[in-house]
Amino acid sequence: DTGVSQNPRHKITKRGQNVTFRCDPISEHNRLYWYRQTLGQGPEFLTYFQNEAQLEKSRLLSDRFSAERPKGSFSTLEIQRTEQGDSAMYLCASSPPTSGSTDTQYFGPGTRLTVL
Amino acid sequence: AQSVTQLDSQVPVFEEAPVELRCNYSSSVSVYLFWYVQYPNQGLQLLLKYLSGSTLVKGINGFEAEFNKSQTSFHLRKPSVHISDTAEYFCAVGFQKLVFGTGTRLLVSP
């Protein structure tokens, strides 16, 4: 069990550029979540997948944000035309299959995005 | 809708002293509650969770929390803290989608 991994760990970009982050969940975890954490705040839910299906999206996920999870394995989060307000830590989590109740979400180390 | 309030943004405490980090929640559905810890430059790590059953939940590193439905609280406690417990602690409520509080920074000094 190597844990949830995220790449890159840090990304600095200029306003208006597109960025893409990758998350590799724990093997055999069928659920994958994206959260955003700004300085001094708790993580805020963005979206989640069960296998390859995106089941819920937050209103925080504007049209500039898109997430995919092809083949139900790794996931990517893309931000188009970045704005300074997008600067944050982007966290990915995964959880194992359960029989209907919630289960533990295991978090990755996050990708810190800085938009100049 | 669900929400979490962490009443203290920062809690300073001396090593070996007891500590309580407060968390109050609001939920219109069945309650699943969590405490996560975040060390500097690291991801969130689960300390403990309440799904059902006994209202006293024991977690890792000597932490425990008590679910109190009448007071809608889920306070985190440790009888004797160590320097290494210095970190940010987050309370969360949810089912799949977690709603987090703003966090409490625990500062343990010698």
Image (spheres, grey):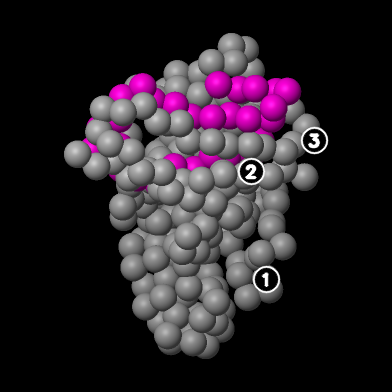
Q: Depth check: give the residue in front, A54 or B23.
A: B23
Residue that appears at 55% across and 21% down: B66
Residue that appears at 45% across and 31% down: B20
Q: Main secondary structure of the magenta part?
A: strand
Name the spot of residue B108 as percent of width and height, x first.
29, 41
Query: Mark 2 — residue?
Result: B4
What label does residue B28 carry, if any?
3
2 and 1 marks in contact (CB < 8 Å):
no
Which residue range is magenta in the image?
B66-95
Residue that appears at 26% across and 27% down: B16
Quadrant into which the N terminus of chain A falls: top left
Query: Mark 1 — residue?
Result: A62
Q: CA distance from mark 3 to mark 2?
A: 12 Å
Name the spot of residue A5 as percent of width and height, x first.
36, 50
Residue that appears at 33% across and 62% down: A9
Above or below: residue A57 compared with residue B22: below
The stretch drawn in magenta includes residue A32: no
Q: Nearer the viewer, mark 2 or mark 1?
A: 2
- Of mark 3 and mark 2, the one earlier in the sequence is 2
Identify residue type, mark 1.
Ser
> Considering the numbered disc 2 on the image, is that residue within a helix, a strand or a loop?
strand
Would residue A13 be visible to someone looking at this image?
yes
Name the spot of residue A89 as percent of width and height, x first.
45, 62
